[in-house]
Amino acid sequence: MQSRITSQNSQVERPLRADARRNYDLLVAAADAAFTEHGAGASLEDIARRAGVGIGTLYRHFPTREALLAKVLDDSNAAMAARAAELEMVSPPTAALVAWLEAMIGHSTTYFGLSKSFAAGMADSCSEMGTSCQALSAAGARLLARAQAAGELRDDVDICDLVMAVHAAAWAAEQLSDPTAAQRLITMLVDGLHVEAPRRAIARKPSRRTRRTRR
């Protein structure tokens, strides 16, 4: 039994053959082009045609749409994690977090409809997209913890909620065809998370009913 398990593991970890690697790379490039043109819901059959392979080959390499999306986003996910580390070193705590969340908006709208796939990934931590979401959340969590440690943001804020809010704001911006809507929503959100949120004093005139004339 042990030898069988070892054999199976060695087969899983074995590098792809040259022709299989070529098909893999062609599928990733074709998917990027199709997602850019048609959004995250682009036809998988069309992606296979663009790559010059059959749909069966696509599914052998990428069993689900989310697996393909996650692979296509590998480089941009790594860039987002690196951006978080950079901001942590050079920017004030809350400013660093806000800058990263704003960058996340752009990341979530790399392809039309991508925010929906990200949200689904956050709900399924075992999927390839879920793994990507976890890595991004971990990068943002360090920025959030830094702002909380500085006493700038409430300590009951959770990074998963913030990231989910980013995806929701990105989705709203897509539906409204208003690229600035997401940033406005995130700005309002973070403003409300400050430990001492600014409040405007409201000047009220005394009611006539409360005025009393002494005689």
Image (tube, grey):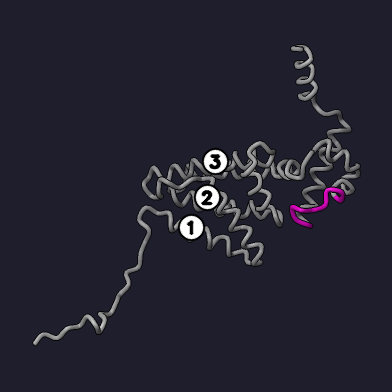
Q: Is residue 213 above or below residue 200?
A: below
CA separation in Å, label 2 and label 3? 12 Å
Element type at marker 2?
helix
Spot occupied by residue 116 in the image (x, y as percentages of width and height): 67, 52
Region rendered in magenta: 38-46
Q: Amino acid at mark 3?
A: Ala
Q: Amino acid at mark 1?
A: Leu
Residue contact between numbered discs 2 and 3, judged by CB atoms under 8 Å? no
Residue at the image point whose x is 38% and y is 50% from the top: 152
Instruction: Tell me which label, 2 or 3, sits earlier in the chain.
Output: 3
Instruction: Tell me which label, 1 or 3, sits earlier in the chain.
Output: 3
Residue contact between numbered discs 2 and 1, judged by CB atoms under 8 Å? yes
Point out the frontmost of discs 1 and 3: 1
Spot occupied by residue 55 in the image (x, y as percentages of width and height): 88, 43
Q: Which mark is residue 189?
A: 1
Q: Is residue 169 left or right of residue 129?
A: left
Residue at the image point whose x is 39% and y is 42% from the top: 149
Q: Is residue 52 left or right of residue 152?
A: right
Element type at marker 1?
helix
Q: Amino acid at mark 2?
A: Leu
Q: Which mark is residue 139?
A: 3
Residue contact between numbered discs 1 and 3, judged by CB atoms under 8 Å? no
The C terminus lies in quadrant: bottom left
Disc 2 target residue: 162
Residue at the image point whose x is 84% and y is 42% from the top: 26
Q: Does the segment drawn in magenta span residue 203?
A: no
Q: Is residue 132 left or right of residue 59?
A: left
User: Dot 1: within a 10 Å radius of its alpha carbon, few (fewer than 14), some, or many (20 or more) residues?
Assistant: some
Q: Is residue 69 left or right of residue 102?
A: right
User: Dot 3: within a 10 Å radius of its alpha carbon, few (fewer than 14), some, or many (20 or more) residues?
Assistant: many
Element type at marker 3?
helix
